[in-house]
Image: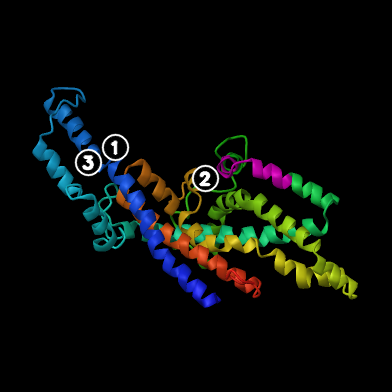
Amino acid sequence: MDRLSYFIRRLLLVIPTFLGITFLVFGLTQFVPGGPVEQQIASMRGFGGGEAGGGGAGGNVTISEDQRKAIEREFGFDKPFLARYWKWLVTDSMGMEARSYKYNNKTVWQLIQERFPISLTFGITGFVLTYLICIPLGIGKALRNGAGFDVVSSVVVLVLYAIPAFAFGMILKTLFSGTSDHFFDVFPIGGFRSENWEDLSAWGKLKDQTHHMFLPVLCYVIGNFAVLTILMKNSLLDQISQDYVRTVLAKGGTMKRAIWGHALQNALIPIVTGIGGILTIMFAGSVLIERVFSINGIGLLTLDAIVGRDYMVFMGTLALTAVLGLLGRVLSDFCYVLVDPRINFGKDT
């Protein structure tokens, strides 16, 4: 199978895979208890108890069958399941045109548009910095395997890996955001930008943005730091021990040429598996980090939608994440080919 046929097939497989993911999750959201119908009924009973019950949040108001059917009709639960899924998929454009139950009846797409620049900024910045730091560090550790630099850096990497990213964020926030009188007030306590950001000069905007992004991006990098660094080191060490490196040396080549001209290219192949993740990272981000630093990104929007049973918002973000995740897999395979054109996706080598 040539590469073009392989990529065409992978792209075509995105469609049934996406339908399977969304169909399954949509079914779960429609039948789990505590949905919008139940919430509306509970709200009506609580309100009625306060008004008509003569005191207290009694919840004694009886909801008639006609009222219940009207509520189900309002939220679209009066239709069969397949009809509801078809409406979400086609009529509502994968839920993008659906209305939120929680956010003032805004469409899902409007909510995503509001938060997309935030997640995009944090996601790409953290992703790029992770690769720019971890790949050179992993190469340096491999070239100095067993030396003092390798040992000390391994201890630091493993210690940081042992600390969850959100817990590390809370520590940094306590130390450097003025949440305690005993520590420093260097960075903002949270948020994406200052309230007067629009009034700042170009340099002021850059400075303010960097000021707000420093701690959460640092937490993001720390969260992915150890795995990528150790993977890069072990991959390069494995390639250095291969026969082709010894062949280069036997033919009079230097170790520098063997490593930088041959081994490094092959060592990068496992690393590119994460490249496709940039498509989902810019949307999903880190939910817990967004929560710690009060960043209104896509990840926090998804979490709030789950907690608040706002299924339309949750399904909309899920649909985008699923599409981008599936396309990211194809992008990773494409990166394989760029790193090593000898890769053959067929059965025969």
Query: Pointer 2: what residue?
Result: 189
Q: Residue placed farthest to the front in the image?
A: 348
* Residue kind at label 1, given as amino acid type: Pro
Q: Which mark is residue 90?
A: none
- Residue 153 location (% of width, % of height): 76, 49
What kind of element bears circle 3? helix
- Residue 36 location (% of width, % of height): 25, 42
Which residue is at 71% across, 53% downward? Answer: 230
Q: Quadrant of the C terminus?
A: bottom right
Q: Can you say whether 90 is above or below 152 in the image?
A: below
- Specify which label sits upstream in the sequence, 1 or 2: 1
- Residue 266 location (% of width, % of height): 71, 67
Q: Which mark is residue 37?
A: 3
Q: Nearer the viewer, residue 269 or 119?
A: 269
Q: Residues within 10 Å of mark 3 (few under 14, many from 20)?
A: many
Q: Between label 1 and label 3, give the one nearer the viewer.
A: 1
Which residue is at 29% across, 37% downward? Answer: 33
What kind of element bears circle 2? loop
Which residue is at 24% across, 54% downward? Answer: 82
Query: Pointer 1: what residue?
Result: 33
- C-beta proximity under 8 Å, tags 3 and 2: no
Q: Main secondary structure of the magenta part?
A: helix
- Residue 184 location (% of width, % of height): 62, 42
Image quadrant in which you'd find residue 54: top left
The part of the chain drawn in magenta is 156-170
Which residue is at 60% across, 48% downward? Answer: 223
* Residue kind at label 3, given as amino acid type: Val
